[in-house]
Image: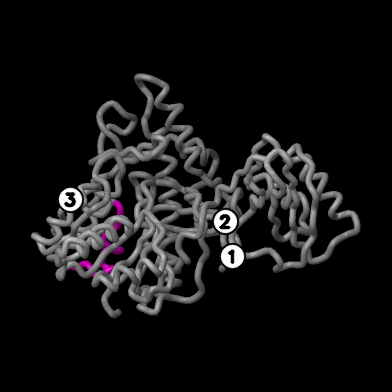
Amino acid sequence: MTEFFDALETRDPAQREQALMAALPAQVAQAQRASTAFAEILRGVDAAAVTGRSSLAALPVTRKHELLERQQAARADRPAGDPFGGFAGVGWRGLVRPQGARRVFQSPGPIYEPEGLAPDYWRAARALFAAGFRAGDLVHNSFSYHLTPAGSMMETGAHALGCTVFPGGIGNTELQLQALAELRTHGYVGTPSFLKILLDKAAETGVALPSLTRALVSGEAFPPSLRDALRARGVDAYQCYATADLGLIAYETAAREGLVLDEQVIVEIVRPGTGDPVATGEVGELVVTTLNPDYPLIRFGTGDLSAVLPGHCPTGRTAPRIKGWMGRADQTTKVRGMFVHPSQVAEVVRRHPELRKARLVVSGEMANDRMTLRAEAPTAAEDLAARIAESLRDVTKMRGEVELLAPGTLPNDGKVIEDARRYE
């Protein structure tokens, strides 16, 4: 509980915020200089003026579907097309940036991500340290080593700690179990479900794994019930939240109270479908600005829901904490054959300053859909519901009902569109 990866983890929160905001203008300038995509997205932005969270919040959010669309468009421009869609500041011979990439990965889409030359490029060492990994440990890495970056993400972090790595990859349960037993591995990294498969197989076949005592898991939900089941088998497992675009975003500590933010990211929680920050504690979409100069993503929307927790981690780490993954922010739903997006709900709210919060509930049965906008308003003029219904029709091109509610009525779960239809 008293060991830390480095001194950054215990900084005064004001000092951390000052350092992050001081680094922000240079990172925005780097994005404009090194990324042709952000040169366009941030055209006209004075990087030197982006010195705080309010000026950062004024910049557009770039979401994964936009990244994919730019990559696809650029790749179609053969032979000169940039497979990174202009987002990366590194590459290899023949690209806009002719050097600086150690590896390149392909995630579903496909979306291509670079890995730069920096040691611990994805910053996973911090999460591994918090999970109990130390120099000299043998780490069994069961994340994929092909196409996607998860295997490399954890391996480079383990190497930065001074660990030895067994590159297990995915599948081959019997061979991986054999390696765990014969090499007397100290720790596991991979998905929690595959760790459970390995431990179940060990129990079934009578294979003892006394040296396997710690794990860092990711890529899937990690409920307390599974955590406790793994601990009953002798493995103390912790989770981290990372993406192929951003690297490590947050990690669990021995306190088991939320996930602590990494020291090299600036995180905002925004209302789904918008770039507007929500109040502290409110559930919204995680938007991340990374300080990585090789892949300088500014206000990158993860599409994941979370919320900031109050206070600091009991371990002594002073960075903000998030609750962890709480669902997907993209709640786009098809109604009467037409797509309705969270951004459209946000536009309706924007047209009526009286509203604080709203949720579009789609009910009924398929082919017999009903839309009801449930909206919180402190006070309501006599014709407010009618005016909102008119805006709803104008924005979505469909009729819907409006139900006005007292502030605080809607649940704090980040949902902007709720599909409550019956599908049976």
Q: Which residue is mark 2?
A: 270
Q: Which residue is mark 3?
A: 167
In the displayed structure, 377 sits above or below 299; it is below
Give the Cα distance between marks 3 and 2: 38 Å
* Amino acid type for the residue under numbered disc 1: Glu
Residue 353 placement: quadrant: bottom right
Residue 184 placement: quadrant: bottom left
* Amino acid type for the residue under numbered disc 3: Pro
- Is residue 417 in view from this perspective? no
Give residue 282's mark. 1
Secondary structure under badge 1? loop
Q: Are marks 3 and 2 in contact (CB under 8 Å)?
A: no
Classify mark 2: residues with Cα within 10 Å, few (<14), some (14-19) or many (20+).
many
In the displayed structure, 65 sits above or below 26; it is above
Residue at 28% x, 44% y: name it.
Answer: 115
Magenta region, residue range: 122-135
Classify mark 1: residues with Cα within 10 Å, few (<14), some (14-19) or many (20+).
some
View extreme (top): residue: 79
Query: Which of the two discs, 1 and 3, sits closer to the camera?
Result: 3
Secondary structure under badge 3? strand
Is 106 left, or right, of 354 in this rendering? left
The percent position of residue 102, horizontal first and vertical second, equals: 23, 41
* Amino acid type for the residue under numbered disc 2: Val
In the displayed structure, 332 sits above or below 200; it is above
The percent position of residue 132, horizontal first and vertical second, equals: 24, 70
